[in-house]
Image (spheres, rainbow, N blue to C red):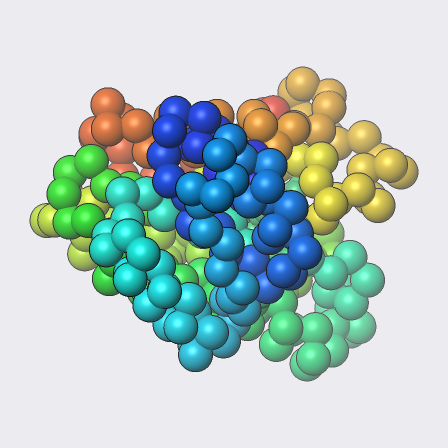
Amino acid sequence: MGRASAQRFASRGDRIILADRNTDLLEESRRSLPNPDKHLGLAMDIADRYSVEAGFSVAADEVGELDVAILAAGIVDYHNDGPLEKVTDEAWERLVSVNLRGAFLTAQAAYRLIAKRNTSSIVLVASIASLIGQKKLYAYSAAKSGVASLARTLAMEAGKTGVRVNAISPGAVATSMTKDVLQYSKPLNVLGRAGQPEEIAAVLYGICDPDASFLTGANIAVDGGAAIY
Ligand SMILES: NC(=O)c1ccc[n+]([C@@H]2O[C@H](COP(=O)([O-])OP(=O)(O)OC[C@H]3O[C@@H](n4cnc5c(N)ncnc54)[C@H](O)[C@@H]3O)[C@@H](O)[C@H]2O)c1
């Protein structure tokens, strides 16, 4: 989703700063953008404060401020996050550390760097797991609910600066994260199919459009209607 979003914003001429802990994927993503040399890839582990601050400090040197920040990195674990008895401390710590602490650290760093004007926008990628129950995803669901809450709290602080802060909650989307599960089960939603990363990118793009100027503090389901079941 992060890559598709970067492509969407780059296609209108924006300069993109990508961050990922996987440097091969990072370079692949950068190369997939129009005029790749215009954009910057930063190796970053979002769960590690030092890594986040070092990365954002390079970003600050490069661009000074950000107009848009999309915080999309995350992990899921379909094997060790349920049933309850089977959730290990290690799995809980890892999932919460990347998905929630990572969102907190990157939101903190992004908020420092975001231009404090009413065309700026931060979007945190939560999950449908923040809206409805997800079997055997204990830590993931708790973390993503925390991400939606983080977006609301930051929206309250940021409001006076004009910066809008929202969360989106995707349902099943066909990405590397879900490729193993989606090949065995069809997602339960109104449209009867998984979403494509480009369909999430389109919503992220719309949320960040300055014309969406009254939208802040929301957690928007982008899920083919899954949350209405
Ligand atoms: N795919 C879905 O169905 C779905 C549904 C709901 C929510 N989400 C959320 O959407 C976001 C994007 O997921 P995706 O489906 O594009 O998955 P993805 O696996 O394609 O992308 C996630 C990216 O995050 C990076 N990442 C993981 N841990 C990191 C860390 N510690 N530091 C920096 N980068 C790290 C990975 O290297 C990967 O490139 C995630 O937050 C995910 O939880 C996905």
On the image, the x and y values in percent for residue 138 come to 65, 62
Q: Can residue 203 be seen from the camera position used here?
A: no
- Residue found at x 68% / y 56%: 24
On the image, the x and y values in percent for residue 84 come to 74, 68
Work out whether 125 lies above or below 211: below
On the image, the x and y values in percent for residue 136 come to 74, 57
Image quarter of the N terminus: top right
Figure disc tally: 0
Q: Nearer the viewer, residue 53 or 148?
A: 53
- Residue found at x 39% / y 25%: 12
**Horizontal placement of 71 versus 154: left or right?**
right
- Residue found at x 87% / y 36%: 183
Q: Nearer the viewer, residue 206 or 190?
A: 206
Question: Which residue reaches farthest left?
Answer: 160
Question: Which residue reaches farthest right?
Answer: 184
Q: Can residue 26 be seen from the camera position used here?
A: yes
Work out whether 174 lies above or below 25: above
**Horizontal placement of 114 versus 16: left or right?**
left
Work out whether 117 lies above or below 195: below
Determine which quarter of the picture holds residue 227.
Answer: top right
On the image, the x and y values in percent for residue 13 come to 37, 29
Image quarter of the C terminus: top right
- Residue found at x 71% / y 48%: 177
Q: Nearer the viewer, residue 98 or 5?
A: 5
